[in-house]
């Protein structure tokens, strides 16, 4: 990582200390790779998801959303290919009983002898076996094989099986998209790196259905569009890259795939994959369900099975990237501050309000201002410690604006407004706060985004 | 049901036809009791959840949110009592192999002879057996009992195990609350009634921690507050009631419990339970984890384990109640219309825009208006069919405002604005639309809600 200011350790510590992210079930020793979002984290992640939904669904006339159940009919996963081949090769160490991904052995360490790789210690490894990554459970009050179902390993299939329902009810015609956000589950053999690779995770997926032949243009469009989304919301362009898969990396059904990668302190890692899935998924479901999932174009009188461009992003990875990317430290050594330079639309708290003193009515006045703005924005009120210390607390969680109520406020109805990034202060009337904050936290507008590919 | 206008059948049909709710995995014959929200349903449910979060979390200084993982450490469910006793008594029919809740036999029918109850047909029932309602799965790449975990049957426990993390990171002190929305799973023996009782469902739960002794006041406060939320968002007061549990209905740890019930076409049913859970949950986790989960009040120098008031609502049931309650039909027999009189803040589409004709630039003008407002509101554009028919389509999905662009628009920049409920039409300037819509869809403000109990 070129910038040594931010480390994963600093981010993990900040997340725990300020209430962004806790380990799941921590009082019971934690549950491996599962995390809980705390009071600030839940708002940050809500804002990230809202920014995606806004950009992908509500501001577009050509995309609608769905929200499908996590439990789906088991035939869905036969048709999608997950039952047969959603698996990783796994080896066991006969000595220490450790279990490892066979294709990751080179990057792994023996749990007993951390200086050595598994298999290069005293232990002998078994032959690789295939391990299916879907979580299995049973529905209905009986554990027989007929009732076995899976937790979805991706949200995409819920979209494909509803293709005709959406076309008919929402009167959409290709090119158009169906988007979904929600939890998916993969029983990873080796999860890790905090929020980056977890067994339970949240996806933000779009399946964009296009007439065959127009797929290359839309594939290029969505690559550009999705890169733009991250930079619109503040991700530094030099930490972001688009990496096209080599032909031997492609899934057998994919015509093309490119990853949006971010330079985490742990290296370049995938935030999102954008794939041209062709007509593979709909054709699989046509075959397995026996239903006609083709589209008939009333104008051209043509019937076709649409091609699909799929931008598939991780909400937790995205949230982690926004945290890492916005983390900064500045100031002289004896007055160093940590600051999250989050886009104001993503910041969990928009405005903090401080009375200079609690006494002389300043506390009540500050609380009155906080109460009046709380109906519109996430507002914090803090009356303890020095003003400087209170600013620092808000800088560290990314609050873009701070307001101080002092003795002049009681006389002339003005307050001191302080900017998180520039630390500049100005005097503004209380009455102007609503409009100032509203303008500051407005989401980026990118109208050029809607131009379809040539 | 006193009002015969609305039936479950009409609601289910409307939901399928217009894209509110589809059966999960429908092309594979469906998955029992699982549903998918379509393009309109996902927006309606998002708005219901947003209304709850806004009322319960963001507009209150005394409540913060969390978002915990669905997979939790198995010890959590031992401490909570779910492993030992979260079960229903179940009987099997030896003849037809049907499986029934023993305590519901009186309301059930034999699947082979629907005129008879199970056990009163030719079949013989087994003795009741206890059936645990938690979905079980296995984490990590091995199915041994050590790795067995459960899908959470409620979101509440994620809050209790994070109590200390939240107190420390968010600097909260009782009385204060922690809220969570998210999916929970219960392997019900007999789910049913559309969205009402499903095995996968979404909860909106608040655990409000209070000093012992103040719990009765806060219990009364939250009953009043939660009833108010439903009526603030338009539920008819005469279809809503609060039913206090009799002492023999109470869970052994509860000091009191009351259900918010709604008069569905299937009868009075629970939307939400409000319970005084005392200090039971925190004390269980203190015992099972060995951790100190008490609170030390710096001011009074007292240490105590807080009591908990829990309003626990169903997001899917709530969504269904808003659909049912808002459904109406009016007009003469030869021009009958169906209309969802949803609160504008909940309506999935806020504004529909129609060109009177497609030609003469009217289509382009209407589309231009739609595009300019889409950055702020969910906007529909419809150019097909008569204006009257287009209004009807929007009435049926609850769109509060409709705008028609006609030849006068091209001359004087005004449009016809039509109100869903009154069907009144008025002429307004295009420039005024943003403010008109913003005022119309604003959430209800209820500042009295924050007054704590005496």
Image: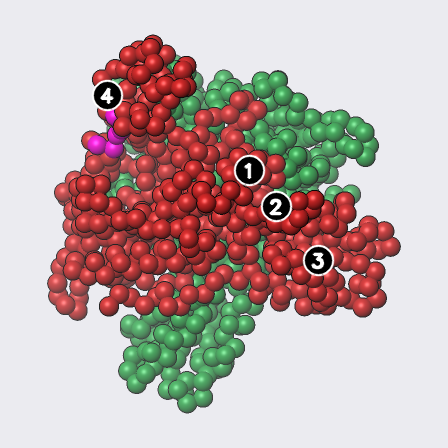
Chain colours: A green, B red
Q: CA distance from mark 3 to mark 4?
A: 61 Å
Residue at 52% over, 59% down: A345
**What is the CA distance from the residue labelled 2 to the residue labelled 3?**
19 Å
| Precedes in sequence: disc 3 or disc 4 | 4
Q: CA distance from mark 4 to mark 2?
A: 46 Å
**Which region of the structure is painted magenta?**
B85-89
Question: Quadrant of the rendered structure where residue A329 is?
Answer: bottom left
Tell me the subunit letter for badge 4: B
What residue sits 64% from the left and 43% below the top?
A63
Residue B325 forms part of the magenta stretch: no
In the rendered image of this protein, does residue B60 appear above or below residue A449?
Answer: below
Label 1 lies in what chain? B
Q: What residue is shown with label 3?
A: B403
**Mark 2 chain:** B
The dot on residue B128 is 4
Q: Residues within 10 Å of mark 1 (few under 14, many from 20)?
A: few
**Label 1 sits on residue:** B10
The image quadrant of residue A128 is: top left
List the residue tagged with mark 2: B338
């Amino acid at each position: 990582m070129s910038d040594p200011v931010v480390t994963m350790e600093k981010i993990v510590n900040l997340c725990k200390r300020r209430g962004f992210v806790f380990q799941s079930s921590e009082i019971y020793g934690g549950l491996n790779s599962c995390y809980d979002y705390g009071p600030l984290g839940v708002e940050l992640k809500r804002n990230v998801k809202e920014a995606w939904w806004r950009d992908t669904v509500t501001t577009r006339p050509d995309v609608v959303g769905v929200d499908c159940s996590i439990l789906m009919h088991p035939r869905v996963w036969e048709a999608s290919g997950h039952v047969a081949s959603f698996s990783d090769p796994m080896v066991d160490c006969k000595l220490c009983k450790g279990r490892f991904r066979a294709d990751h052995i080179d990057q792994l360490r023996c749990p007993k002898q951390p200086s050595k790789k598994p298999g290069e210690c005293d232990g002998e490894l078994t032959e690789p076996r295939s391990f299916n990554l879907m979580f299995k459970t049973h529905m209905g009050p009986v554990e027989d094989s007929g009732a076995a179902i899976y937790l979805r390993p991706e949200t995409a299939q819920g979209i494909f099986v509803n293709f005709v329902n959406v076309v008919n009810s929402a009167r959409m015609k290709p090119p158009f998209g169906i988007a979904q956000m929600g939890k998916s589950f993969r029983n990873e053999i080796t999860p890790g790196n905090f929020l980056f690779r977890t067994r339970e995770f949240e996806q933000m997926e779009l399946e964009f259905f296009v007439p065959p032949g127009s797929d290359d243009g839309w594939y290029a469009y969505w690559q550009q569009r999705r890169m733009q989304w991250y930079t619109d919301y503040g991700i530094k362009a030099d930490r972001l890259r688009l990496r096209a898969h080599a032909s031997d990396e492609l899934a057998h059904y994919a015509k093309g795939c490119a990853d949006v990668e971010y330079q985490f302190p742990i290296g370049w890692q995938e935030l999102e994959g954008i794939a041209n899935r062709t007509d593979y998924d709909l054709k699989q479901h046509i075959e397995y369900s026996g239903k006609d999932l083709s589209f008939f174009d009333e104008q051209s009188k043509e019937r076709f099975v649409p091609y699909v461009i799929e931008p598939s992003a991780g909400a937790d990875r995205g949230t982690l990237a926004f945290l890492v990317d916005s983390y900064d430290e500045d100031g002289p050594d004896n007055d160093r501050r940590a600051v999250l330079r989050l886009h104001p639309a993503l910041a969990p708290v928009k405005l903090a309000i401080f009375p200079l003193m609690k006494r002389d009515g300043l506390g009540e006045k500050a609380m009155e201002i906080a109460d009046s703005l709380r109906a519109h924005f996430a507002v914090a009120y803090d009356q303890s410690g020095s003003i400087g210390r209170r600013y620092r607390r808000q800088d560290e969680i990314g609050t873009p604006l701070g307001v101080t109520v002092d003795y002049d406020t009681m006389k002339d109805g003005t307050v001191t407004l302080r900017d998180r990034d520039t630390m500049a202060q100005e005097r503004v009337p209380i009455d102007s706060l609503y409009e100032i904050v509203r303008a500051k936290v407005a989401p980026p507008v990118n109208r050029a985004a809607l131009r379809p590919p040539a």
